[in-house]
Amino acid sequence: MTADRVPSRVEADGAGGLTYQGSCYLLVRPETLVALQKAVEAVLGERAAACLAAGGRAGGGTALQALEGAAEEIVARLLAMGGEIGWGAFALERLGSDELVVSVRNSPFARAYGAAVTPVCHLTRGVLERLAEVALGAPAVATETACAANGAPACRFVARVR
């Protein structure tokens, strides 16, 4: 089956909303989010990254509420969900007792942002930071150590227990 023939799990609710596996979602073009990101960066400078990551943590936390199981199962489900809703092709590199490492190929955020000097996938970083907290059972901090917007073949995120 080709990608353009994959059945969508996104369903219209008949009242103007969309759901994915029972959760409400909003389809937004990456260019729209990147334009918002760049506007916030213009006003807040480096502080914009923290604001966007906070949004990712909030959304990731909501998505994680619907997932149950062992840490490995939760990580696998959220990474698969990320790919299914268009956030890129996620791959688990490592899940240890104090570290979660994930790479993302074809990040729509990096692609829409264009060339950048610093990593730009702050929303994804926030989601993965929240995932790490759930999987590792402790507060965690995530860093984007490579970004396709900086010329890397994939975006790479390392989350460690604080």
Image (spheres, rainbow, N blue to C red):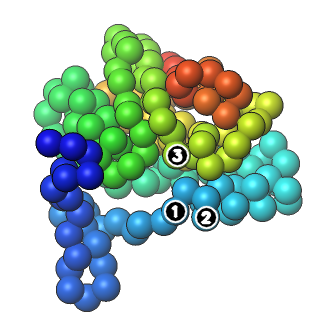
The kind of residue tagged 3 is Pro
How crowded pointer 1 is (Cα within 10 Å; few <14, some 14-19, many 20+) is rated as: few
Q: Earlier in the sequence, mark 3 or mark 2?
A: 2
Residues under labels 1 and 2: Cα distance? 5 Å
Position in image of residue 73 (x %, y %):
18, 29
Q: Nearer the viewer, residue 138 or 20?
A: 20
Q: Is residue 6 above or below residue 150?
A: below
Report how many numbered discs are placed on residues in the image: 3
Identified at 75% across, 31% down, the residue is 118
Question: Which mark is drawn over residue 108?
Answer: 3
Check disc 1 and give the amino acid type. Arg
Horizontally, residue 121 falls left or right of residue 20, namely right
SS at circle 2: helix
Residue 158 shows in this picture: yes
Q: Residues within 10 Å of mark 2 (few under 14, many from 20)?
A: few
Identify the residue shown where x is 28% and y is 30%. 75
Q: Residues within 10 Å of mark 3 (few under 14, many from 20)?
A: many
Q: Tell which of 152 and 139 is nearer to you.
A: 152
Please tell me the numbered disc located at residue 29: 1
Q: Dividing the picture into quarters, in which one does residue 36 lie?
A: bottom right
**Residue 45 at what x, y percent from top left?**
85, 48
- Locate residue 72, reporting x and y percent: 22, 23
Q: Tell me what residue is drawn at x 38 percent, y 34 percent.
A: 89
The answer to whether marks 1 and 2 mark residues whose Cβ atoms lie closer than 8 Å is yes
Q: Which residue is mark 2?
A: 32
Mark-to-mark CA distance, 3 and 2: 11 Å
Q: Quadrant of the C terminus?
A: top right
Q: Quadrant of residue 34?
A: bottom right
Inspect the image, locate mark 2, and give the three-letter code of the amino acid beneath it.
Thr
